[in-house]
Amino acid sequence: MHVVALRPHYEIATKYGQYWCEELYNKYATKLGYVVVDLYREICTQTKLMDVIESVNPVLIAGVCHGNVDVIVGQYNKILFKVGDENTARIVKGRHVWMLSCLAGKELLPWMVNQCGAETTMGYKEEFIFVIGSYPNSYAEPFFRSHFSGIQAFLNGKRAIDAFNITVSTFKKYLDDPKVPEQIKPYLLHDMKCAVFFGNGEARINPPGGVMKRAVINVKMKRKGKEKAEIIFNVTDEVSGMPIPGVSVRVDGIDYPKAWAGKTDENGKFVISDAVVGRYKYKLVHEDYETVEGEITPDMFHDVGGKNE
């Protein structure tokens, strides 16, 4: 089963967009068993997209492109989709088109559904604003993770309307997160409010590799004196609540060069007993579950503390 990624890259906004599209869409879809046709840089054109439609019949088209009320453009602002365009109508008929593109949710995306027979479309009815810091993540990351969370859910078999609502709820998660800088939250709120969905909310895509299950990660940070600390991971299945053994855990110190790696035991537990209070990044991987990544900060260490992902 094929999906298409639209990834122009020719100035600062598309530089960030193409990176997060690769990380959060291309790699995720590949992990689920989809074949990703990546229209990157110079081949992000309508002509190439039409060739792909004819040759592999993709179910979903998604990406990060500049847009306006009635148009979405690819590399060097060349037209990909436009209201009234016959090629656009042929491209989107019977397909799902989920785009991070400014203003296209006003006219173009509903036109695709109502006049061209697109199954579903998702995007934004106002300008999509994101804040940049150090490339490629920093301040920009919550904006792109919010957008692509819904696409990931859709690829993983969720109903279209439920997947769209996951995008909205992920924006809300970042808005409620005290670790997210307050100065970027007005823009997260703006983007959340202008996200729109059109089409058949009951539609689904069945992932070729099967639905990937979700794990619940509970991380407890215990102080052991002034500086010493213990970090405990408890991993359970989201549906059954049962512990998941054999999850690969990798924890890296951010402020100093120390790392730990191992797997959860039969109780779904992985313990680091020789940590210090500080900043860490962690990544949990299991072949049957979605990968989980997160960060631990010094303020999260208490006599008994916790965090849920």
Image (tube, grey):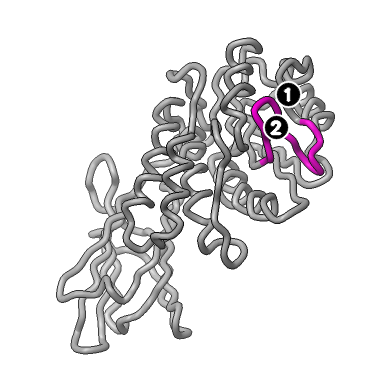
| Above or below, 62 relative to 272 | above
**Percent position of residue 92, x then y:** 67, 20
Q: Residue at x 32, y 63 (%)?
A: 264
Q: Which residue is mark 1?
A: 82
Q: Secondary structure at mark 2?
A: strand
Q: Is residue 24 left or right of residue 15?
A: left
Disc 2 marks a residue whose amino acid type is Ile
| Above or below, 281 relative to 169 | below
Which residue ends up furthest to the left in the rendered image?
A: 303
Q: Residue at x 49, y 29 (%)?
A: 196
Question: Where are the magenta residues, as a range?
Answer: 65-79
**Percent position of residue 141, x then y:** 51, 56
Disc 1 marks a residue whose amino acid type is Lys
Looking at the rendered image, the quarter that the N terminus falls into is top right
Quadrant of the image occupied by residue 121: top right
Q: Residue at x 30, y 56 (%)?
A: 217
Q: Nearer the viewer, residue 205 or 71?
A: 71
Looking at the rendered image, the quarter that the C terminus falls into is bottom left
Q: Is residue 266 left or right of residue 17?
A: left
Q: Are marks 1 and 2 in contact (CB under 8 Å)?
A: yes
| Above or below, 240 relative to 132 | above
**Percent position of residue 151, x then y:** 51, 37
Quadrant of the image occupied by residue 250: bottom left
Q: Secondary structure at mark 1?
A: strand
Q: Residue at x 19, y 88 (%)?
A: 225
Q: Residues within 10 Å of mark 2 (few under 14, many from 20)?
A: many
Q: Nearer the viewer, residue 123 or 279?
A: 123
Specify whether residue 308 is painted magenta. Answer: no
What is the number of the mark on residue 72? 2
Quadrant of the image occupied by residue 133: bottom right
